[in-house]
Amino acid sequence: MVDSKAQAGELKKASAVGMFLVSALIILGAAIMAFRHYANDQLNEVAQDLQGITRLKKSLLNTHIDERHGDAIVFASRRSVIEMLDPEFSPAMRQIARSRIDQDIAALGKAYGYDRVLVLDRSLKVLAPDAAQSEPALAPIVLRSEEHTSE
């Protein structure tokens, strides 16, 4: 009888351990499923946030480019620029216009905080400021890009 009671006690212990393990596995499985669902929700939320930031930055960049394009159109319509580029003006008149452009470029750079202002001809040769002092590494690349040449 002691032996059967011992076996019954062992069986109860094994049963309790088995129930504990099954319960632990169920809880662990539920936690893993909940974590996966939460992780996917988090990833989707982060992806949406990044897409929103990308749209905002693209919009800001387009606005900045449009403003600079407008600035360039206004600057190109200055009398001094037209005189400097027009081959019908005498070299002396073009030189006077050139000195006024250099002053305008300096004033424009100070007023708007531009790092550099360049005047280019149609072949993308730097005309002002002094071509020898300028290093327009990006200007020809930007101006030749499909986006800008298609406009």
Image: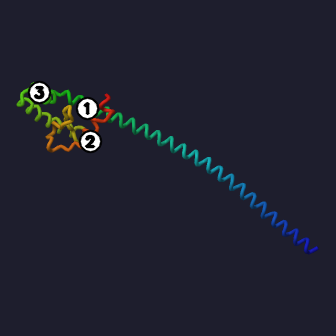
Crowd tier of the residue under label 2, counting other residues whose Cα lies within 10 Å: few below 14, some 14–19, many 20 or above? few
Q: What residue type is labelled 3?
A: Pro
Numbered mark located on residue 71 in the image: 1
Q: Which amino acid does label 1 sit on?
A: Asp
Residue 27: horizontal and vertical position, in percent? Answer: 70, 55
- Residue at 20% over, 44% down: 135
SS label for mark 3: loop
Residue 131: horizontal and vertical position, in percent? Answer: 15, 41
Query: Pointers 2 and 1 in contact (CB under 8 A)?
Result: no
Residue 63: horizontal and vertical position, in percent? Answer: 35, 33
* Image quadrant in which the N terminus is located: bottom right
Which of the pair 27/128 is nearer the observer? 128
Question: Which residue is tagged 2?
Answer: 138
Question: Which residue is tagged 3?
Answer: 87
- Is 146 situated above or below 23? above
Residue 56 in the figure: left or right of residue 117: right
- Residue at 58% over, 46% down: 40
